[in-house]
Amino acid sequence: MSPAAVTWPSNVACTTIGSNLQVKSRGAPFGPDDGTLAPWVVLASLPFAPEIVIPTIRAMAQLDLGMTKRYGFKPSFNQTYVVPDSPTGWWVTPHHFGVDQGPVALMIENYRTGLIWNIIRQSPYITAGLRRAGFTGGWL
């Protein structure tokens, strides 16, 4: 699929990711934006905005990012950075990072059942720490 054939939602999640240029905190409107996207960050946003995440992941699944391979999606890619010898024609990180998988697994489970958040809500240490940090409302 050509990069031009994929339409991304206007509010794709951003984080600190490695790109073809360097590792930086990224994200519009305040961080530098060189077009590098991180599929794992989108997946980790699932319980917050499933109406955005699910179509975005479906679109990313059409790209050659290894979604069905052993470690899943490559952690980051940039369709605007041309790499002629790449199978996709653009930059895809050659690496996988295990640290990316933890938030994905936890947030998929939170979306499915709320298990992780329910456990956290029952911890007096976590709730006390959140209150001491100034958090109020919601499930606190």
Image (spheres, rainbow, N blue to C red):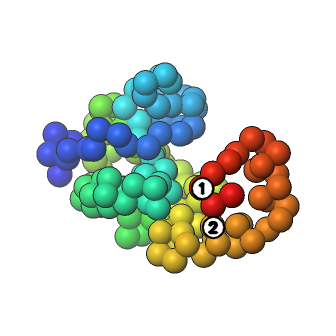
Check the image and report above or below for 8 versus 139: above
Check the image and report above or below for 124 versus 6: below
Residue 57 in view, yes or no:
no
In the picture of the structure, the residue carrying the numbered disc 1 is 138
Along the viewing direction, whichever of 17 and 66 lies nearer the viewer: 17
Q: Mark 1 vs mark 2: give the one in front.
A: 1
Q: Mark 1 belongs to which amino acid?
A: Gly
Residue name at image x 70 percent, y 67 percent: 121
Residue 92 relative to residue 137: left or right: left
Residue name at image x 64 percent, y 72 percent: 118
Quadrant of the drawing holding the C terminus:
bottom right
Residue 115, quarter of the rendered image: bottom right
Along the viewing direction, whichever of 127 and 47 lies nearer the viewer: 127
Disc nearer the start of the sequence (1/2) = 2
Check the image and report above or below for 60 versus 114: above
Question: Circle 1 — which element?
Answer: loop
Residue 97 relative to residue 134: left or right: left
Q: Mark 2 belongs to which amino acid?
A: Trp
Residue 110 relative to residue 128: left or right: left
Instruction: Please tell me the numbered disc located at residue 117.
Output: 2
Q: Residues within 10 Å of mark 1 (few under 14, many from 20)?
A: few
- Position of residue 40 measured from the top left corner of the image (x, y, whole percent): 48, 54
